[in-house]
Image: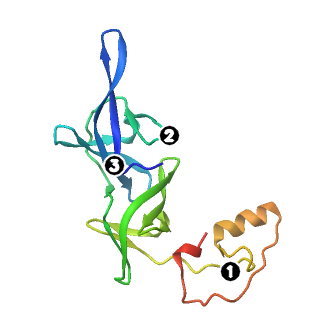
Amino acid sequence: MAFFQKPIFVRRKKGDELIYEKRGICLGVYISKKSAQIKYLFCSLDDDKTINLPFSAIERITENGAIYLKNLRSAFPNQCARLTPYLPVYSCDGKYMGRLDDIFTENSCVSKLVVSKKKYPALAIDGICDAVLLKPLPYPLGEWSKEEQSGVSRRILKEKIKQGKLIKFTLSLAPFSVDFDRVG
């Protein structure tokens, strides 16, 4: 589910029926600093005003990405950081990684960041202000066989142990080499 640059519609009563009218676009989201859960929407209205709306104001989101809201009651974001498109993204080492293109969400939480067409897990976020700072991820425990070409993280290892499946480990990953794309 994407939020960046999506139209927002607000319901209002016209006579005896409820209608939805387009009121602006969603510019970004505010996320919790601890859990990466989306708390507020950062929207621009058609009359050149910006407004912060609670995530609970969303009534539904259509397949084409249009956001339908119950109301336009503004709220002040508390203990949150704002994610908007085109924010510069840096690693903790100071390496420029690109600009934030999009986010992927699962159950109203940001799960992945898309930075210059590469995906990074939301767990890698170390700080957000005028730029997004990504911390290095923990060293992967191993990797799958050559056919599967993916890393093994703790989460994947726990799932496989519960399922009773064996994992074939290799030692081809150097302990100092952490690749964000390969970690589960």
The answer to whether residue 35 of the structure is visible from this angle is no
Q: Position of residue 14 (x, y in %)?
A: 30, 14
Spatial CA distance of label 2 from label 3 is 15 Å
Residue 113 lies in quadrant: bottom left
- Count residues near mark 3 (Cα–Cα under 10 Å), then give few for <14, some for 14-19, many for 20+: some
Residue 23 or 175: which is nearer the viewer? 23
Q: Give residue 63's mark.
A: 2
For the residue marked with disc 1, what is the amino acid? Gly
Q: Amino acid at mark 2?
A: Glu
Which tag, 2 or 3, sits closer to the chain's start? Answer: 3
Please give the name of the residue rendered at 30% of the width and 40% of the height, measured from the top-left corner: 53
Q: Nearer the viewer, residue 9 or 107?
A: 9
Q: Any mark on residue 142, and which?
A: 1
Q: Give the numbered dot on residue 112.
A: none
- Location of residue 57 with respect to 113 vertically, above or below: above
Look at the image and name its color scheme. rainbow
The local crowd at label 1, few if under 14, some if 14 to 19, many if 20 or more residues have their Cα within 10 Å, is: many
Comparing marks 1 and 2, which lies closer to the viewer? 2
Which of disc 2 and disc 1 is earlier in sequence?
2
Residue at mark 3: 5
